[in-house]
Amino acid sequence: MNQLSDLPLPLSPRFLSALNYATSLHARQFRKGTKIPYISHLYSVAALVMEAGGTEAEVTAALLHDAVEDQGGAPILALIRDQFGVKVADIVNGCTDDIPEADKPKKPWRIRKEAYIAHLGKASCSVRLVSNADKLHNARCIPCGSLPSDLAAASRRYALLSASIAISG
């Protein structure tokens, strides 16, 4: 199996495979409360990582960072490891706030987010890069007036706090 490069891009056929895989995995999802295809978020996070000089493994993980949480848990993480390598799977795992056992619900939002923020301080630079891009894009997508003011403010604070931890790590 060819490994993803640690060098800055160009992109390999394996990256293009990840692009197609992420697109098909999230094809029927939309951003919360919108008609915006969810894949736009993954493309945007990958673009931010790419523009920050991320490696191909980091950009690939950015495309796949929500796959485990949103599309099947541990079996999806195993598939990512098999198809895209250990580095990508480790970054994706580090960006995942909960992997519930089969047929079990996720932990409550606040518990997941507090644990995730604590984890970021010890996370690898690659995990912090992808996480920071994710939080930045999420913060950009909270339009003024689209959420109740307390929820919008809390979401922005969470995004900024987790991004600041990711940067300072």
Image: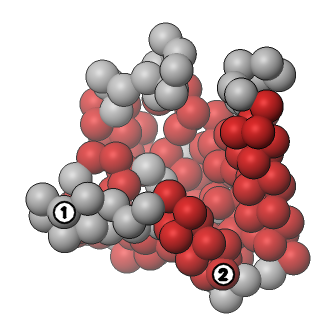
Q: Residue furthest top?
A: 35
Residue at position x 64%, y 59% from top?
130
Q: Residues within 10 Å of mark 1 (few under 14, many from 20)?
A: few
Could you say whether the residue bearing mark 1 is in a helix, strand or loop? loop
Residue at position x 32%, y 68% from top?
99
Q: Residues within 10 Å of mark 2 (few under 14, many from 20)?
A: few
Residue at position x 71%, y 28% from top?
148
Looking at the image, which is closer to me, 168 or 117? Answer: 117
Figure colour scheme: secondary structure
The amino acid pointed to by label 2 is Ala
Residue at position x 79%, y 31% from top?
149
Q: How far apart are the alpha carbons under marks 2 and 1?
A: 23 Å
- x and y percent of residue 38 in the render? 47, 28
Res 104 label: 1
- x and y percent of residue 79 in the render? 21, 61
Residue underneath mark 2: 118
Q: Is residue 52 visible?
A: no
